[in-house]
Image (tube, helix red, strand yellow):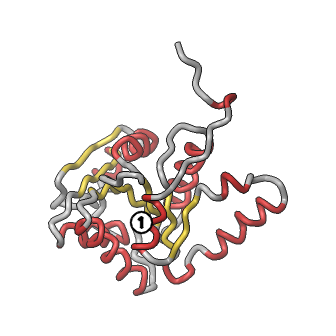
Amino acid sequence: MNSLNSICVFCGSSEGNDTRVIAEALLLGEKLAEQKITLVYGAAKIGIMGKVAQGAMQQKGKVIGVIPEFLKRKEVVHQGLDELITTVNMHERKMKMQELSDGFITMPGGFGTLEELFEIITWSQLGLHQKPIGLLNTGGFYNDLLALLENMVRRGFLKMENYELLLVDDDIDRLLNKMRTFKPIQVPKWLKPERT
């Protein structure tokens, strides 16, 4: 069993137009708080990001925001966070979020959300971490993306074992259970860092 003391949530800085996604974001924050799981996220008070934080904070959960300096100046930072970490740039932000988290959940979002998801799953594929990565497929939001990934497997660009690094569900409790029971793949010898 993986101990999930903290989970990083990647999601949109926009709210979108699907009320199910907004409700699910609040519920995810609430469930993390109820299970004493620290929420690590991008620190914004807007969009789906803000809703996840709101849900956690309403249940007295611990919330850590990580934001680069240039975004902090745009005044989108949530004011009620337990901790706010400011980074120099986006890459440092993602490194810090990864360091602080025992696992990752991606909710609906746009380019930035996809970029965060694919970077963190690539790091897993390369053996840079062995943490569970969940995709919360609310209302089938990611069905087309999953079809694309399956096509990559069929056409030989993506190994099935790497495709299976992505844990998918449309139910929060089932997804968290999959993350707790996740077994990482063996890292190929050629990818293991040399010991100095």
Element type at mark 1: helix
Of all residues shown, which one is farthest toward the bottom?
Answer: 19
Q: Tell which of 41 and 76 is nearer to you.
A: 41
- Taking the spot 48% from the left edge, 71% from the top edge, the residue there is 136
Query: Quadrant where the N terminus lies?
Result: bottom left
User: Does residue 63 lie above or below 122 as drawn?
Assistant: below
Answer above or below: position of 33 versus 41. below
Q: Residues within 10 Å of mark 1 (few under 14, many from 20)?
A: many
Q: How many labels sit on residues?
A: 1
Q: Nearer the viewer, residue 62 or 88?
A: 62
**Residue 118 as seen in the image, left or right of residue 190:** left
Could you tell me residue 93's position as x and y percent?
Answer: 39, 44
Residue at the farthest top position: 196
Left or right of 167 on screen, residue 104: left
Q: Position of residue 3 (x, y in %)?
A: 35, 52
**Mark 1 belongs to which amino acid?**
Leu
5 lies left or right of 185: left
- Which residue position holds label 1? 176
Image quarter for residue 26? Answer: bottom left
Residue 20 rendering spot, x and y as whole percentages: 42, 85
Residue 187 in percent (x, y) is at 62, 37
Q: Residue furthest right?
A: 155
Image point (59%, 20%), residue name: 194
Splitting the image into 4 quarters, where does residue 4 fall?
A: bottom left
